[in-house]
Image (cartoon, rainbow, N blue to C red):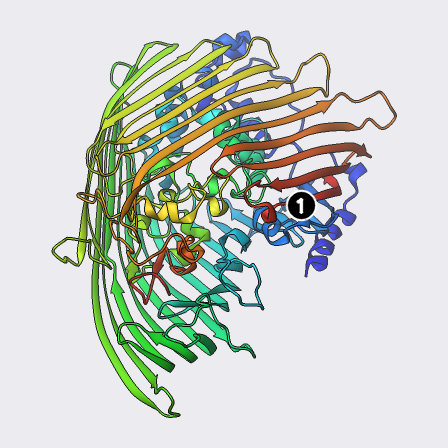
């Protein structure tokens, strides 16, 4: 692989040494830059979701993240903190969520954004990385939630983990989207407005005035899915 | 083990002679320099400086090791471990080495990296080895501490004195992931490969032991693993690429609950029922789940002409699984359905499930008009079918009031359930470069699907159907503008809106608008301002639901590293975020309507300032900053993480550094869940 693979014919540039006489991919429109890189890198499995990826659509080219001439770490960073720094450069409001108390440990450098997201694209929403049999990357670490369970909690498959959790960070324990567990549950298990919605199951004997019933997963411990109990209690 | 590892890393360092080692050139430069010289048709080229050969720098890399001191945690230690979980002791913060043997028949290059070893909650190790054109070998290992015990999740009614105020669903698990991959003949037209990965977790925790309507918090053990095997072949031709893969997996998921406390465990039903106190004397529960499955995958990408890209993926997997459950307990319990008290219970459940799962996607990108117009068309489908059956055998020994003997009772039940969910999406987008600086984007996305799920309790007033169904229909309009000046300014606006009327859940995206604006301005070199605004408004106007969600994020950021003052740098951002969610629901025990209202008004700020070095003999680099999060609303919280860091060079290749951090969490509504701690880190970063 030579310089001209990316920079085009260099004869004139060699004579004049002028920057105007050579192609600089990092200064081209994103689509042109991508075309140059993808002459070689179109054969990666990650590229299958590229066209659906928001980086392509938002004019973010390969060179926005991969510095070609600045060493191996700049070209393809492997350290979690270095990867996070690159992503946070643009996704600042997302990075701010990681400053909340209940979050994945990205600020500590324990994880990186690409552990969960595939920046090149994915067939899943939000460019969620896929693992194993096309499952969301959440299950790479939380494999006990993967199943297949005999008794599924349907949001696990239809809306995904984000139906109940804020994976980037939350002020609520366990990264829940609400400050009390019962409210997370009752917003679907409400017995009203169930015409086209799943989850309209009323636990009518539950007395919410009792603390016992205020944290639903105190009893329904297998809330992600159970092998033995349709009520997800065991 | 950790000390041995540190010693192993230190040995090659001691063997090095840093003074005699030339500064390594980046590998990419070494590879491209001769080629560049060859491609440059200069009439009388200067004799090129001899490139550094692998023999000169066969070992390069960095080592970052030191010690972390924690002053002790004030407040709730379990919350600290659930949130931060960094411990004291010697640490290998990071190590990266590249070995390039001068002449070796079997290997050209070995890359090794390890991060966060020494008791930290996430340890990684990675080895990549390759011989050009012959093989590439990748090995990756991760060890994750997976800890969560939060007091606010405990039921105050529980009086298990052995576990006071602990989370009733807590866990302390070590999860290890190992990935191995071997590619043969990389760079050739046909590349076979083999891969293996294993993900396993082991640990303990607390969980509720449920007997009828009483819950007893007891210790539990967790153990699970998944082994995945894959083999495939990649066909890499000039205009098309195809990957065919066949794989399979086996998995186990085991759990054991044990209770044998010397005093009876009353659970959380403290008041006598029909004159008798319920309690658990001893109990055991075992889950043993075995699963396996095969999957086939095909990936295809093609670039038939310069103005078109095509890609497609298909995956079919067919997992099946068996589960066995056994429970035996002694004590005094009540079955309200009979109703009768019983002193012992023995249950056995056998279950199996099948879950065929086809998924596919296809995309086309057309770039007519010299690439100024791009047409993106994509389609995807994901169809999950899950059917399971379970057979229960339950034996009770009923108590006789006033008698020593009991009456045995055997119950059996067969349960069959089915879950089906489909998700389909079709999207068309057009992007047009009006000028080299301005791109317009517009499109349409249609999302549809159907779901069928078991209803474990039938809906009040319904016909008693055992299943519920859901439908998903969403038409989304997409728009966007991207503007970039040649050097200083860039702005991107994205907008999408949908008047959807059918979604799977009451809180799903329904009638929504989402917008995002991102701008970046660089007035002078070294100074950059960024502003980002995003909003999501989602409504479900159904009179029985009345769901409304409004979430906003506004961020301002600055990054300043002036060229004049070397070493001075400033990076900071401030985010104001608000969430307001409102939905009606039915209070189960009263059947009266109520409103669930959730609010969060949060300020988040981060700052890191690098101070210029004084002109001392040893010029230190000082950094100050940190982050804060402060919120008001439904669960107010304050979380502060200030930090100070100093680093100064020691010799030509080493840098000594020290860091202080303070972690402090307080929550006004949950005072007992706060913590505070100081942490000091000191170490040496050595570059070879």
Secondary-structure class at tag 1: strand
Image coords of residue B216 (percent x, y): 46, 68
From the viewer's perspective, tell me whether residue B242 is left or right of residue A138.
left
Q: Residues within 10 Å of mark 1 (few under 14, many from 20)?
A: many
From the image, tell me which residue sits under label 1.
B93
Report in which chain the residue with disc 1 lies.
Answer: B
Residue at 29 percent of width and 49 percent of height: A189
From the viewer's perspective, tell me whether residue B155 is left or right of residue A213.
right
Q: Nearer the viewer, residue B357 or B598?
A: B598
- Find the residue positioned furthest to the left: B463
Residue at 11 percent of width and 56 percent of height: B463
Q: Nearer the viewer, residue B378 or A216?
A: A216
Does residue A8 appear in the picture of this structure? Answer: yes
> What is the quadrant of the N terminus of chain B in the image?
bottom right
- Find the residue positioned furthest to the right: B617
- Find the residue positioned furthest to the front: B275
Q: Is residue A12 above or below residue B69?
A: above
Quarter location, residue B628: top right
Q: Nearer the viewer, residue B311 or A223?
A: A223
From the viewer's perspective, tell me whether residue B305 is left or right of residue B656.
left
Q: Is residue B295 above or below residue A16?
A: below
Q: Is residue B424 above or below residue B137?
A: above
Image coords of residue B130 (percent x, y): 52, 47
């Amino acid at each position: 692989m030579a310089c001209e693979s990316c920079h085009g014919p260099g004869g004139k540039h060699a004579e004049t040494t002028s920057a105007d006489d050579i192609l600089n991919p990092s200064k081209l429109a994103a689509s042109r830059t991508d075309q140059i890189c993808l002459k070689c890198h179109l054969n990666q499995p990650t590229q299958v979701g590229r066209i659906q990826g928001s980086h392509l659509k938002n004019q973010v080219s390969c060179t926005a993240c991969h510095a070609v001439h600045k060493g191996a770490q700049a070209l393809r960073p492997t350290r979690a903190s270095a990867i996070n720094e690159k992503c946070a450069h643009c996704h600042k409001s997302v990075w701010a969520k990681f400053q909340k108390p209940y979050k994945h440990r990205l600020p500590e450098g324990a994880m990186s954004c690409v552990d969960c997201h595939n920046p090149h694209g994915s067939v899943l929403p939000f460019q969620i990385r896929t693992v194993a049999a096309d499952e969301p990357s959440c299950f790479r670490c939380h494999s006990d939630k993967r199943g297949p369970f005999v008794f599924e909690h349907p949001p696990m498959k239809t809306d995904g983990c984000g139906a109940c959790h804020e994976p980037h960070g939350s002020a609520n324990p366990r990264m829940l989207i609400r400050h009390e567990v019962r409210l997370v549950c009752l917003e679907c298990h409400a017995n009203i407005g169930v015409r086209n919605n799943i989850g309209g199951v009323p636990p009518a004997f539950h007395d919410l005035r009792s603390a016992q019933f205020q944290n639903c997963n105190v009893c329904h411990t297998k809330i992600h899915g159970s092998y033995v109990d349709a009520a997800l209690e065991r | 083990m950790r000390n041995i590892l540190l010693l192993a890393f230190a040995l090659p360092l001691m063997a090095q002679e840093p003074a005699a080692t030339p500064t390594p050139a980046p590998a990419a430069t070494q590879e491209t320099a001769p080629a560049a010289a060859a491609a440059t048709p200069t009439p009388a080229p200067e004799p090129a400086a001899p490139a550094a050969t692998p023999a000169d720098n066969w070992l390069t890399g960095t080592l970052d090791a030191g010690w972390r001191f924690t002053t002790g945690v004030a407040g709730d230690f379990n919350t600290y471990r659930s949130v931060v979980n960094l411990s004291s002791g010697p640490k290998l913060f990071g190590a990266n080495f590249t070995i390039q043997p001068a002449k070796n028949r079997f290997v050209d290059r070995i890359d090794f990296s390890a991060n966060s070893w020494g008791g930290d909650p996430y340890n990684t190790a990675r080895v990549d080895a390759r011989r050009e054109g012959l093989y590439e070998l990748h090995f990756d290992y991760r060890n994750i501490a997976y800890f969560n015990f939060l007091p606010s999740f405990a039921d105050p009614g529980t009086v298990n004195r052995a576990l006071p105020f602990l989370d009733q669903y807590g866990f302390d698990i070590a999860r290890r992931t190992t990935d191995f991959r071997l590619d043969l003949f990389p760079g050739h037209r046909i590349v076979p490969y083999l891969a293996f990965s294993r993900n396993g977790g082991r640990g303990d925790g607390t969980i509720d032991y449920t007997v009828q309507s009483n819950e007893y918090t007891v210790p539990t053990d967790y153990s699970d693993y998944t082994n995945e095997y894959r083999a495939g072949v990649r066909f890499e031709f000039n205009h098309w690429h195809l990957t065919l893969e066949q794989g399979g997996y086996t998995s186990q998921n085991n759990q054991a609950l044990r209770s044998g406390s010397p005093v009876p465990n009353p659970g959380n039903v403290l008041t006598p029922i029909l004159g008798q106190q319920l309690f658990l004397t001893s109990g055991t529960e075992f889950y043993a789940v075995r699963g396996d499955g095969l999957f086939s995958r095909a990936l295809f990408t093609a670039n038939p002409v310069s103005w078109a890209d095509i890609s497609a993926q298909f995956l079919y997997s067919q997992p099946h699984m068996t589960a066995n459950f056994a429970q035996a307990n002694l004590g005094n319990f009540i079955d309200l359905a009979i109703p009768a008290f019983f002193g012992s219970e023995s249950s056995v459940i056998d279950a199996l499930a099948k879950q065929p799962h086809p998924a596919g996607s296809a995309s086309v990108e057309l770039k007519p008009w010299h690439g100024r117009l791009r047409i993106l068309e994509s389609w995807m489908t994901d169809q999950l079918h899950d059917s399971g059956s379970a057979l229960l055998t339950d034996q009770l020994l009923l108590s006789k009031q006033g008698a020593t003997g009991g009456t045995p009772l055997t119950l059996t039940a067969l349960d069959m359930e089915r879950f089906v969910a489909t998700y389909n999406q079709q999207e068309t987008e057009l992007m047009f470069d009006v000028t080299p600086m301005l791109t317009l984007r517009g499109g349409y996305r249609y999302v549809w699907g159907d779901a069928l799920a078991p209803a474990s309790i039938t809906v009040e007033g319904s016909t008693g159907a055992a299943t519920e169904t859901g439908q998903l229909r969403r038409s989304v309009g997409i728009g966007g503008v991207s503007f970039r000046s040649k050097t200083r300014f860039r702005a991107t606006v994205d907008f999408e809106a949908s008047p959807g009327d059918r979604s799977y859940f009451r809180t799903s995206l329904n009638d929504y608008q989402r917008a995002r604006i991102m701008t970046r301005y660089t007035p002078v070199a070294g100074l950059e301002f960024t502003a980002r605004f995003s909003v999501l408004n989602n409504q479900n106007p159904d009179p029985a639901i009345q769901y409304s969600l409004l979430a906003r994020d506004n961020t301002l950021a600055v990054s300043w590293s002036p060229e004049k003052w070397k070493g001075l740098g400033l990076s900071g951002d401030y985010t104001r975020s608000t969430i307001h969610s409102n939905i009606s629901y039915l209070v189960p025990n009263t059947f009266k309507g109520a409103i669930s209202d959730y609010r969060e008004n949060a300020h988040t700020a981060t700052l890191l300032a690098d101070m210029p070095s004084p002109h001392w003999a040893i010029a230190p680099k000082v950094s100050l900053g940190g982050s804060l999060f402060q919120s008001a609303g439904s669960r107010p919280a304050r979380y502060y993480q200030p930090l100070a860091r100093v680093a100064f060079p020691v010799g030509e290749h080493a840098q000594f550094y020290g860091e202080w951090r303070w972690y402090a969490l307080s929550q006004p509504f949950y005072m007992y869940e706060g913590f505070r701690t100081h942490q000091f880190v000191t170490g040496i970063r050595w570059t070879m």
